[in-house]
Amino acid sequence: MSVVVRSVLFNLLFYLLTAIYLIAAAPTMLMPRSGIIWVAKFWGRTNLWLLRRICGIGVEWRGLEKIPKGPLIVAAKHQSAWETFALLPLFADPTFIVKRELMFLPLFGWYMWKGGMIPVDRGARARALTRMAANARRAMAESRQIIIFPEGTRRAVGAEPAYKHGVAHLYAQTGAPCLPIALNAGLVWPRRSFLRRPGTVHVEILDPIAPGLGKAEFLDRLKHDIETSTARLIAPASL
């Protein structure tokens, strides 16, 4: 089958199965939070299986042994929708920093509330950061892993990085270590494209950044670590 046919088939199954999961997960609204987190992880694994079987897209995980136990900030490169589900199974009790608007979506938003996702009102600026930090501290008190995309939105492969200060504020306010993650998912699942190109997503878990750095020093370190590794992961495609 051609890339176009495989992509269409995958997208149809992806949205169909997502709808089925949303309906099947209804009982978790009456269960502890762990119920919806389990469903979310299983959904992530299902999507990875579909990508491998239909589109010929695999994944290579590097540095999994570097993931600390307990409360953690996970700062990942954001190139496509791939990382929004693929990273879930890596962590014991993950939660995402998400746009506040997503929390009001029928079913999907309700499950995000149940799962304890952390909403951010981007229009509120300073007040939004204060609320985000307070919610993050509560999540940390429950030993959760907070996943944040430091650039705030998907960036095309090779685009100039645009790191926001929210991740540095989170780091300073929680006193938790930060785990940087580099990846090249945008090569096989391009931003704003329905095509799913065959290949391997390389995900590199980098050395954790211990608490205690100043905001500016931390953000410089985070950006250097992620961007250096990401450039290396996408380099073969430019040859």
Image: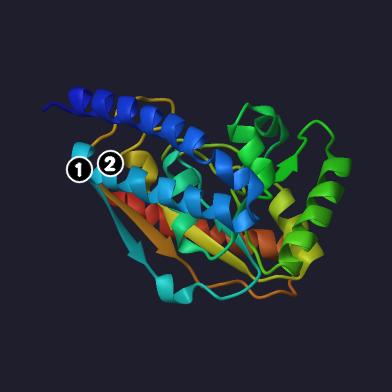
User: In screen coordinates, is 223 left or right of 235?
Assistant: right
Disc 2 is placed on an element classified as helix
Q: Nearer the viewer, residue 162 or 148?
A: 148
Q: Quadrant of the N terminus?
A: top left
Residue kind at label 2, given as amino acid type: Leu
* Quarter residue 43 falls in: top left
Q: Is residue 239 visible?
A: no
**Residue visible at 20% across and 29% down?**
6
Residue wearing tag 2: 50
User: In screen coordinates, is 197 left or right of 70?
Assistant: left
The dot on residue 82 is none
User: In screen coordinates, is 86 left or right of 170?
Assistant: left
Disc 1 is placed on an element classified as helix
Residue 102, placed above or below residue 129: above
* Quarter residue 143 falls in: bottom right
User: In screen coordinates, is 175 left or right of 85?
Assistant: right
Residue wearing tag 1: 53
**Residue visible at 13% across and 26% down?**
2
**Residue visible at 28% across and 47% down?**
49
Q: Are marks 2 and 1 in contact (CB under 8 Å)?
A: yes
What's the CA distance linking mark 2 and mark 1? 5 Å
Residue 132, placed above or below residue 80: below
**Residue visible at 47% across and 38% down?**
24
Q: Nearer the viewer, residue 191 or 4?
A: 4
Residue 129: horizontal and vertical position, in percent?
A: 82, 47
